[in-house]
Image: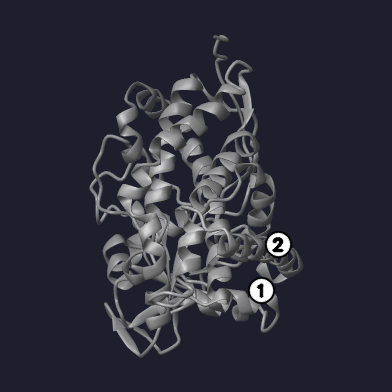
Amino acid sequence: MSHVTGVDAPPSFDLSDPGFDVTSPPVHRARERDWYVETNWGWAVLRHAEAGALLRDRRFRQGNARWPEQNGIHSGLFHDWWAETLLSLEGDDHARIRRLLVPAFRKRTIEAMRPRFQALALELVEAFAARGTVELVSEFAEPYAARIICVLLGLPEDHWRQVAHWADDLGASFSIDVGNQVPRIEAALDGLLGYVDEVVADRTAHPRDDLVSDLVRATTEGDRLSRDELGVALVFLAFAGMETTRNQLALAVQTLLRHPDQWRLLAQRPELGGNAVEEVMRVNPTVTWITREAVEDVDLFGLHVPRGGIVQVLSHSAGTDPHAMPDPAFDITEERPPHHGFGAGVHHCLGHFVARTDMAVALPLLAQWLPAAEPDGPGEWLPVSGNTGAVRFPIRFTPRAAG
């Protein structure tokens, strides 16, 4: 929702309104008027160039640290855990913990897992290809994302349903309704923290060749990672990696099905999978805004942001900005300026190679095995503000003959 206080007054957007759509025409019209707009949570950046400059400006820090307080949450398990996640940490602590996690997420490490991702995607698709219908979230996106997280962390793959359930409930942390979701979030946190503690205890006693064992060693060697920091980091990796990939996969298929020619092209040219991921995240990202907080008074392209001021980058608006690209229409063959779906600067998403690789594997395979696919009804979707995605996304397609 937006309102205008006078004939020529600039709009003001209510980002907390469940009916507000960050991809809507009012946002595009505001982008034509100026590079930013006022909101109920500070300002929102609407254009590509200014978005990139803001995200790399060291006069701003990650703005999510204040998210619980902004929603009336001032204490408790969720409040305390949130303050210790990579999203909230800054400076030396952020750099130290990130440095310890980076080796597991390097491009060559993730590329070596591509055959495993391919086999998993094929296993899931084969289960419904002959049927001609699929509920994409529960039958593909969620098990695919959750099992990949289990593989990355060295958890038993048959635990994926419970891990996914906890991660799904923790996903409410990014909801614009987070203030009403605290009991659900804290129950998931309690369960996942307890589970991770058992895994850490097992790897301490019986080290393996996996990420958890590597991080357990980091609690006693070199750059120290405390047991509490280890638990917080593992819970965050499990939930963030699963929830965002699941949501982005559904949004990717939604976008491609709105452009049937692109769906067919992807089936014919699977090498375009990586480019398809970039295009989807440019026009239909699950992370619809990225938050920054000014650490000092800042004058930014004529906008004065006082210390403590909050600025949001609206990902879709920046990604489809005609000031940055002459024709922003969806096209998986085009090379575009980098989108901001994974953030930028020191808080650039740690797991971006995982997300890019697993989606680049999954999307062409889905296009090949689900010909003539189209939505089978409207499905059920989260608000297009905050972190968005599908709750249910039924699809029908031409069945594939068995054998």
| Left or right placement of residue 40 versus residue 317 in this view | right
Question: Where is residue 182, by image quadrant?
Answer: bottom right
Other residues around mark 1 within 10 Å, as few (<14) / some (14–19) / many (≥20): many
Residue annotated with mark 2? 188
Quarter of the image that includes the C terminus: top right
Residue annotated with mark 1? 78
Residue 86: give x, y in percent of width and height: 47, 71
| Left or right placement of residue 63 versus residue 46 in this view | right
**Does residue 389 lie above or below 89 as drawn?**
above
Q: Which residue is at 45% across, 37% downward?
A: 117
Total marks in image: 2
Residue 41: give x, y in percent of width and height: 52, 75
**Does residue 157 lie above or below 323 as drawn?**
above
* Front position in the image: 159 or 130: 159
Residue 78: give x, y in percent of width and height: 66, 73
> What kind of element bears circle 1?
helix
Q: Estimate the spatial distance between the alpha carbons at disc 1 and disc 2, rounded to whole Å.
A: 10 Å
Q: Which residue is at 55% across, 15% downward?
A: 398
- N-terminal label among 1 and 2: 1
* Front position in the image: 308 or 188: 188
| Left or right placement of residue 49 versus residue 156 in this view | left
**Does residue 155 lie above or below 277 as drawn?**
below
Q: Amino acid at mark 2?
A: Ala
Q: Which residue is at 47% across, 40% downward?
A: 252
